[in-house]
Every structure is written in C-alpha cells, then in structure tokens.
Image (spheres, helix red, strand yellow):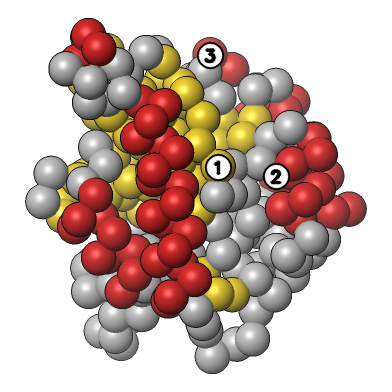
C-alpha cells in the first residue's frame, strides 16, 4: 500500500490529477499551505480538486492558510493537524501544521514552544496507535509536519540561511519517526536523514513535487517524485 503527499499547494489544483498513481493511493495527503492566505472557501476549492483525483484526502493548515481552516477541515472529516490516525497495523500517521514565526506575518504561525508541545502531544497519540504486538509493541510513525527542521538542506534559502524550526529538528532527533514529510521552504526540495528518520521536502506542487510513501512487509519507505 502507498500514500502520496504534497506540500505547498498554493491553489495549484491542476497538478493533482497529474501525480503518477494518484487514483490508487490509500490517500492523498496535503501537508499545508493549500492557499495563499485563504480561508474555508478557498480550501474547499482545493479539497474538491484533490478529491477528483483521489476521494481519500487528508489535509492540514499551513502558515499561509487562515487559522479557522483547521476547524473547517475537522468538520469535513479530513483534518490531520494535531491529530494521529492509524494507517495499517503497526503504522500510524501524525500531523502538525502551521509554521514557526516568519518575518511576513502569515496567518497561522506559532512559537517554537507551542510547536514543540504540539509535536509531543501528537506523537504520543501516534505512538499509541502504532503499537502492535506483532512488532514487539513498537510500530512505525509517518510524520507530516509543515515546517521544515532547522539546519538541514530542507530549510535552506538560496542565500544560504537556514530558516526552519528548531523545535521540529529537536523533535525528529528525539522521537525518530520512520519518515517525516515537511514543506514550507519551497527552495528546500530534497531529502536527508536525521538519525534513523528519513526526512523529505517535495517543494512546490506547482513545480511537480510530491512524495510517495510505501508500506510493505512491515517496512516504511519514501521517495521524492516529480510530475
């Protein structure tokens, strides 16, 4: 089974149907920034377009989406921000949206302290869901976190500055989920490892970026793709 994850949609809805294998995925997951400072009406258009490509859509708020989007997604039954969901026996999904503070005053920003708290509480939920006696009680976690971790190639601007979240970096180093898909920094498309965690940033959807996550024989793997 496999899932497809895109980040930084920014209303580029024509790209969903072009993602290879989109119709057969267990779900199409939108990791944040569905809109450009948009609210529920704009989000509805994005979700509707995504559901035409695959009716099984999950999504969370990014810093460029209005805060009320979280409640709206929850009412539609598709929210993953600060939520954990079972994906398969021994595998759970956790989602944390928003971003830490930016110079641009975007709609949905949080402090590093709040981000750290959200990550910890959501990870605890996912860890409980992933626990599987068949794997010795410890399952695998797929983390979908909008904010990229600090000090990696995934949060680096063209001028060389690293602008990701320290809370996200510290969480990944401590919790070690199997796979983390992030976004937020459009120029940070790429992948690297933080300990045992494979971290991927697909970049802008308008440039064709996506991540495919496969779960087979108890192994979780992920790879970058481009339309």
Pointer 3 residue: 24
| Residue 169 visible here | yes
Residue 83: give its label: 1
Q: Position of residue 72 (x, y in %)?
A: 81, 48
Query: Can residue 15 be seen from the camera position used here?
Result: no
- Going from N to C along the chain, the mark reached first, 3 or 1, is 3
Q: Could you tell which of marks 2 and 1 lies nearer the N-terminus?
A: 2
Query: Compared with residue 95, is residue 33 higher up or lower down, i.e. above or below?
Result: below
Q: Are marks 3 and 1 in contact (CB under 8 Å)?
A: no
| Circle 1 residues within 10 Å: few <14, some 14–19, many ≥20 | some
Q: In this view, does 87 lie to the left or right of 225?
A: right
- The part of the image, by quadrant, that contains residue 37 is bottom right
Image point 59% across, 17% down: which residue? 23
Quarter of the image with the N terminus in it:
top left
The quarter of the displayed image where residue 65 is located: bottom right
Percent position of residue 67, x then y? 73, 65
The answer to which of 39 and 137 lies nearer the viewer is 137
**Viewer-side label of 3, 1:** 1
Q: Determine the secondary structure under disc 3.
A: helix
Q: In this view, does 207 lie to the left or right of 48?
A: left
Quick one: SS at disc 2?
helix
Give residue 15's position: percent from left, percent from top.
Answer: 62, 41
Residue at image x 51%, y 30%? 85
Of circles 2 and 1, which is in front? 1
Where residue 91 appears, as percent x and y from the top left, is: 35, 23
């Amino acid at each position: 089974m496999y899932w497809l994850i895109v980040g930084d949609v920014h209303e580029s809805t024509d790209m969903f149907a072009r993602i290879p294998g989109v119709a057969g995925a267990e779900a199409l997951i939108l990791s944040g920034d569905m809109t450009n400072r948009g609210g529920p009406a704009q989000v509805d258009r994005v979700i509707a377009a995504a559901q035409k490509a695959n009716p099984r859509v999950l999504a969370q708020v990014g810093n460029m989406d209005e805060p009320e989007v979280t409640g709206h997604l929850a009412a539609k039954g598709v929210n993953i921000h600060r939520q954990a969901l079972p994906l398969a026996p021994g595998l759970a999904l956790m989602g944390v949206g928003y971003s830490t503070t930016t110079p641009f005053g975007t709609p949905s920003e949080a402090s590093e302290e709040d981000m750290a708290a959200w990550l910890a509480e959501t990870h605890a939920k996912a860890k409980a869901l992933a626990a599987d006696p068949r794997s010795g009680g410890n399952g695998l976690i797929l983390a979908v976190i909008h904010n990229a971790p600090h000090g990696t190639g995934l949060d680096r601007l063209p001028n060389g500055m690293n602008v990701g979240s320290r809370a996200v970096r510290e969480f990944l180093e401590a919790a070690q989920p199997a796979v983390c898909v992030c976004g937020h920094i459009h120029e940070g498309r790429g992948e690297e490892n933080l300990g045992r965690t494979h971290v991927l940033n697909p970049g802008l959807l308008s440039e064709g970026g996506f991540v495919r996550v496969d779960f087979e024989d108890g192994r979780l793997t992920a790879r970058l793709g481009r339309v």
